[in-house]
Structures are given as structure tokens and as C-alpha cells.
Amino acid sequence: MSNPTLNEIFDAYMSEKLNPNAYRKCKHPGTLQVNLKTPRELWGSMAIDDFRIGSKARVKASVQGWLAAGLTLPTCRKRVTIMRAAFRFAISEEMIERGQEPVFELPPNSPPRERFVDPKSELPQLLRAMDDVRTPDHIRTAALVLLITGQRRGALLALKWENVDFDRREIRFRDTEAAHERSKKRRVDQPMDDHLYKIMLAAKERATCEWVIEWQGKHCETIYPAMKRLFKRAGMGDLRIHDLRRSSATYVYNELEGDLTRAANHIGDTEKMAESVYVQKDVAKNLKGIEAVSSVLAQARAAA
């Protein structure tokens, strides 16, 4: 029976993920490498059979240590999930036999995030921060486009001016990915109303390269630090970039009288995902239901 070390298994797994001709191409192999760094340091030299003995308690103790050190539950879960994927890969490649892989528990899922920009109490603050002279033009554009279209950060950063059709008033987010690269996280083409059209036209007039989101004449590969500074100036330091997508879906849902289908189509996701992860329903929408129950109670009390 083969008894490879964990590092040998991780190396084979990463070799497959880094292979551009792999059957299932990995879009972000760097994320896998980062999350395997600590397991390599802790257990990389151990043979799989040695690691398997007591693996459940070993992994659980490590997760508790990571949490105590300040790591978030989703980060810990991702590390353990990637380890499990590497072991399953080893079985499929016959590096180890079925039943030889370690058995351990995944950390529990964290509660779903519900943070969004409240349109009444927070959105005015965010818009004022966007208009502040300290906010670079490309960050203001990025924030507005993400908020209006509900698309993911990766879709926006991959957008080129050739994907923006001013004549037809369309932003072709889907064209930023080749057909074979498309995953469950779909990118959706979006039309431009007058507001979005003016935003894109102003950005186009400032453009000095082929990318919509640029910095100093070059492709802007990350907007994370500048967006965090924007949120902090707006008094919303806990806000994340992805919360703009949740906000966009929520606005569509609440403004269109609870139309879940349109909210899901707006962000390019399923209705189930839109309802469970993105849409935050306006509590005021339940008022008629409360009034209906109160009416029944009043009638019953009158008849008592």
C-alpha cells in the first residue's frame, strides 16, 4: 500500500490545479496554496497513515487554536475543506486507497451575512463619501457600478471598454469570461439607464487604457484597500465590498414589491440563493399582514 506524505499529496493536488489544460481548470489556485500553507507547516512531513491515526482530534484542536489566534470560522473551514479535497484527489489518482484517507469534521458554517447598506440611514452617507475629494475617480466609479448592477468585484475588474456598448446601452459582463471559464457564479449582462450611462460615459472620457477600472494608466488589479477607506469615511467600517451586491439585490426586491425573480435575475443568481443569502426584506412590507391579524382579533373581541 502506498503511504505518501501529506506534502506529496498536496503537491500532486496543486500540480493538477495549476495545470492550464486540466479538465476542470482552477480559477484561483493561489487561494488553495495560501490555505494549504499552515497544514503543510504542521503536518506536511507526516505520512498519510500516521496522520490518519487521531486525525479527528488533531484537526479539531488545530481549528480551535486558529480561532483563538483570531482567524474567522469561514477561513478555518476553508483550510479544512481544501485538505479534504486534496485527500479525495489522492484517492481518485490512486495515490492512496479508499478508506486510507483521514477522517475529520469540518468546522460549522458561520451564520449567513445580512449586512447591507440601509437606503434611508446609510446610503446618503455612502454617497457623500463617494463624492468626497479624497475618493479617487476609479473607486467612486467602482462603488457605483457594483451598487447599481449588483455584480461581483471580479466581474467589474475584468471589464474592458470593448465590453461596454454605448450605442445599445449594455454592459456585457459575461464577455469578460471565456465560455469554458464560466462557473456557477454567473456574470450577467446589464442594461444602462440614464444614470448608469452617465457614470460609464464619464469614466470613458477619463480612460487612458483598455480597462474600465484603471489606476495610473494601468489595469487596477485590486480595489480592496481603497474601498475599505471609502467605507470607513462613510462611517461604515464593517461594510465589505460584497455587501454592495446584497444591497443591490435588496433594493430591487423591495422597490419591485417583493419580486424575488427580478431580484435573482438582477444579480444573476437563483431565487433560492437570492432569498437565503442576498435579499434583506423590508420589515415594513409585513405591515399589512400584521394589520390583517389585528383586524381578526378585533372582530373576535367584539363578538366575545
Image: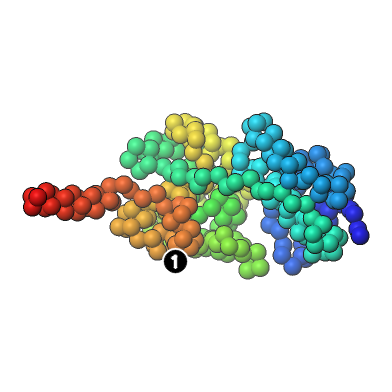
- SS type, badge 1: loop
Residue at screen point 54% across, 53% down: 152
Which residue extends farthest front? 304
Residue 54: percent from the left, percent from the top? 79, 44
Residue 62, above or below 151: above
- Circle 1 packing at 10 Å, graded few (<14), some (14-19), many (20+), is few
Residue at screen point 47% across, 31% down: 233
- Colouring used for the render: rainbow
Residue 295: percent from the left, percent from the top? 15, 52
Residue at screen point 13% across, 52% down: 300
What count of labels does the image hold? 1
Please state if 268 lies on the left or on the right of 95 as rendered: left
Residue 144 appears in the picture as rendered: no
Residue 296: percent from the left, percent from the top? 16, 53
Nearest the camera: 38 or 29? 38
Image quadrant for the N terminus?
A: bottom right
The three-letter amino acid code for the residue at tag 1 is Arg
Residue at screen point 73% across, 56% down: 85
Nearest the camera: 263 or 188? 263
Nearest the camera: 274 or 25? 274
Residue 143: percent from the left, percent from the top? 48, 45
Residue 27, above or below 113: below
Residue 71 appears in the picture as rendered: yes
Quarter location, residue 253: bottom left
Residue 92, above or below 55: below
Q: Which residue is mark 1?
A: 168
Please state if 283 lies on the left or on the right of 291 as rendered: right
Nearest the camera: 74 or 158? 74
Quarter location, residue 223: top right
